[in-house]
Amino acid sequence: MNILEWLYDAHLTIGGHEIAWREIVGNAFGFASAIGGMRRRVWAWPIGIVGNVLLFTVFIAATFDAEAQQPLFGQAGRQVFFIITSIYGWWRWNEHRKARRDASGHAITPRWATARERVGYLLVAVAGVLLTQWVFAVIGASWPAPRWYFWCDAWIFVGSMLATYAMARGWNDFWLMWIAVDLVGVPLLWHSGYYPTAILFVVYGALVLYGFTVWLKASREERDLQPEVTEAIS
């Protein structure tokens, strides 16, 4: 067995339940990325990408292993979207950081999405959930999972995509999106046996509430700091 095979198969056994080290380490990177996002640091994005790659291997494994935990197609698929969006967010935050003239090290100035932007992402959310639950149900037709399972997975998938994009744009709304994702994600992940990720989602919930207050305060205090920066970078 080579080192890559060992890393892939390494796991802990707690209460008779096997937990892959990839899930534990991937979530650790995810949590570090969340802290970096709250602090508006550019390094939050590359750190998050590492966690996304590790978690993708965890969730996609259940799709091909009939004896694995219940498959979460949305959980696996959203890791791919996270990586793509994180590359965009990495670039955008870095450009903002270079354009800002203060020495705080913050990459962006948070703001609320405009009415037009909010209507746009709400329409995407509705259409996205309707479409993805159907896709997941078709893909997972051979799995003994109830219909509500795919609706929940679709909610997490679409909500996570929108939240990550909103974070890249610097919208305060992204914290509220994560709360909506957590409310469904925690019970679904626990039900599916992904205990480390479910527990992390609970911790995320507390971090999200605190992060929301931090960004809200920053959006008020820095609102007029450099309005030209936001206009210059789309």
Image: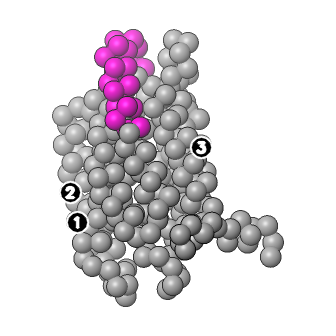
- Please tell me which residue is depicted at 25% across the width and 77% down the height of the picture: 147
Q: Give the range drawn in magenta.
A: 207-231
- Please tell me which residue is depicted at 31% across the width and 17% down the height of the picture: 220
Residue 215 in the magenta stretch? The answer is yes
Q: How many marks?
A: 3
Q: Label 2 belongs to which residue?
A: 126
- Please tell me which residue is depicted at 59% across the width and 43% down the height of the picture: 46
- Numbered disc 1: secondary structure: helix
Image quadrant in which the N terminus is located: bottom right
Q: How crowded is mark 1: few (under 14 residues within 10 Å), some or many (20 or more)?
A: some
**Which of the labelled discs sits on residue 47, or is there none?**
3
Image quadrant in which the C terminus is located: top left
Q: Residue 148, percent across and down?
A: 24, 72
Disc 2 to disc 1, C-alpha distance: 6 Å
Query: Do labels 2 and 1 touch, CB within 8 Å?
Result: yes
Colour pattern of the rendering: one colour
Relative to 61, residue 92 above or below: above
- Numbered disc 3: secondary structure: helix
Q: What amino acid is labelled 1 in the image?
A: Leu
**Which of the labelled discs sits on residue 111, or is there none?**
none
Q: How crowded is mark 3: few (under 14 residues within 10 Å), some or many (20 or more)?
A: many
Q: Label 1 belongs to which residue?
A: 130
Pick out the residue farthest to the front.
15
Q: How crowded is mark 2: few (under 14 residues within 10 Å), some or many (20 or more)?
A: few
Q: Residue 133, percent across and down?
A: 28, 70
Pick whichever of labels 3 and 2 is earlier in the sequence: 3
Frontmost of labels 3 and 2 is 3
Frontmost of labels 1 and 3 is 3
Q: Residue 135, percent across and down?
A: 32, 74
Residue 141 in the magenta stretch? The answer is no
- Numbered disc 2: secondary structure: helix
